[in-house]
Amino acid sequence: QVRLVESGGGLVQAGGSLRLSCEASGSTWRINAMGWYRQAPGKQRELVAFIARGGSTTYADSVKGRFTISRDNTANTVFLRMNSLKPEDTAMYYCNTDGIGDYWGQGTQVTVSS
């Protein structure tokens, strides 16, 4: 099993920045890629960004140029730096892993006020 613990969410004004962290523990050898999804009220969960163990990245078009995903393989931690935040970025952000098994964190709320 893999346990994921997110942190770093909060309330920020439009144009501001936040940094999310997700630390994996347990059977971390199961993990290949790590990343983030988000879900706003009344909407489907959507991919935000993902990073493979080797460092290749994928971003949703809506966050390209504003968000940066990075990873510390030694610490089994993935980060999401979010700049120029917009009210439409408001959502619950979930950490997810890909590899042997599919694991999810409990989520961290990001609220961007206009």
Image (cartoon, rainbow, N blue to C red):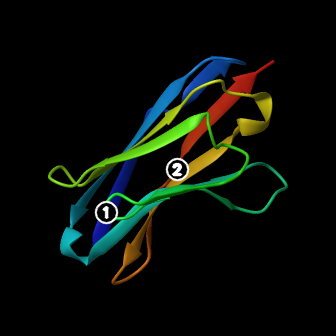
Query: Which residue is farthest right?
Result: 42
Q: Which residue is mark 1?
A: 3
Q: Is residue 38 left or right of residue 18?
A: right
Residue at (14% x, 52% y) in the render = 74
Under tag 1, what secondary structure?
strand
The residue that appears at 52% across and 26% down in the rendered structure is 18
Q: Is residue 81 above or below residue 6?
A: above
Q: Quadrant of the N terminus?
A: bottom left
Horizontally, residue 7 falls left or right of residue 18, namely: left
Above or below residue 97? Residue 35 is: above
At x 71% / y 51%, what residue is drawn?
61
Q: Position of residue 81 (x, y in %)?
A: 48, 34
Query: Tag 1 or tag 2, which sits nearer the N-term?
Result: 1
Answer few, some or many: residues within 10 Å of disc 1's Cα (few below 14, many 20 plus, some between 14 and 19). some
Residue furthest bottom in the image? 100
Q: CA distance from mark 2 to mark 1?
A: 12 Å
Q: Amino acid at mark 2?
A: Gly
Badge 2 crowding class, 10 Å Cα cut-off, few under 14, some 14 to 19, many 20 or more, is: many
- In the image, is residue 18 above or below residue 77? above
**Residue designated by label 2:** 107
Q: Quadrant of residue 25?
A: bottom left
x and y percentages locating residue 19 in the rendered image: 45, 31
Q: Position of residue 73 (x, y in %)?
A: 21, 55
Which residue: 19% across, 74% down?
29
Q: Quadrant of the C terminus?
A: top right
